[in-house]
Amino acid sequence: MSRTLRILVVHGPNLNLLGTREPEIYGTTTLEEIDAMLRERAKASRAEIESFQSNHEGALIDRIQQAGSRIEGLLINPGALTHTSVALRDALAALAVPIVEVHLSNIHRREAFRRHSYVSDVALGVITGFGAQSYSLGLEALLDALRV
Ligand code: DQA
């Protein structure tokens, strides 16, 4: 594989607070640390990570639309928008590249409203419940799907 693969990593609302936000649920690893870890791992497979976090649904959708055909894969933790946003789901459905959905917490072990995801059925797969490692596992799965 000679071409550099471009992977967009999207973090939804409140994930900028990782490290201090409900650490008993989300752990103590910061978003910067997660992004740095993903960049390192991607490098080993000649892939390039671009990360984007926003607390705003429209900003996330704009970024996904901009990425359009310029990326080969998408890793996303949609945060609470997982459970509420048809608009985010539609933006993801319009992408022609593989998508992996990740969550730090196990969304099936928590409140009932977290059990439904609007994103899962437009994703290749979902990794949920392994803390910051969910992102690493998600990236592995995405790279594997892209066969690098
Ligand atoms: C989350 C789970 C969501 O239910 C929650 O709203 C989040 C984070 C997770 O990574 O575990 O913000 O996506």
Image: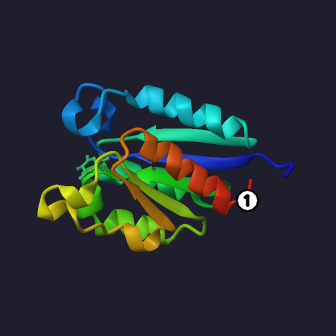
Residue 50 percent across, percent down from the top left: 57, 40
Q: Is residue 91 above or below residue 32?
A: below
What residue do we see at 50% from left, 33% from top? 35
Q: Residues within 10 Å of mark 1 (few under 14, many from 20)?
A: few
Where, by quadrant of the figure, is residue 97 drawn?
Answer: bottom right
Question: Which residue is under mark 1?
Answer: 147
What residue do we see at 60% from left, 34% from top? 39
Q: Nearer the viewer, residue 59 or 72?
A: 72
91 displayed left or right of 12:
right
Q: Nearer the viewer, residue 23 or 49?
A: 23
Q: Secondary structure at mark 1?
A: loop
81 displayed left or right of 61:
left
Three-letter code, disc 1: Arg
Q: Is residue 73 above or below residue 122?
A: above
59 displayed left or right of 98:
left
Q: Nearer the viewer, residue 142 or 86?
A: 142
Q: Nearer the viewer, residue 56 or 102?
A: 102
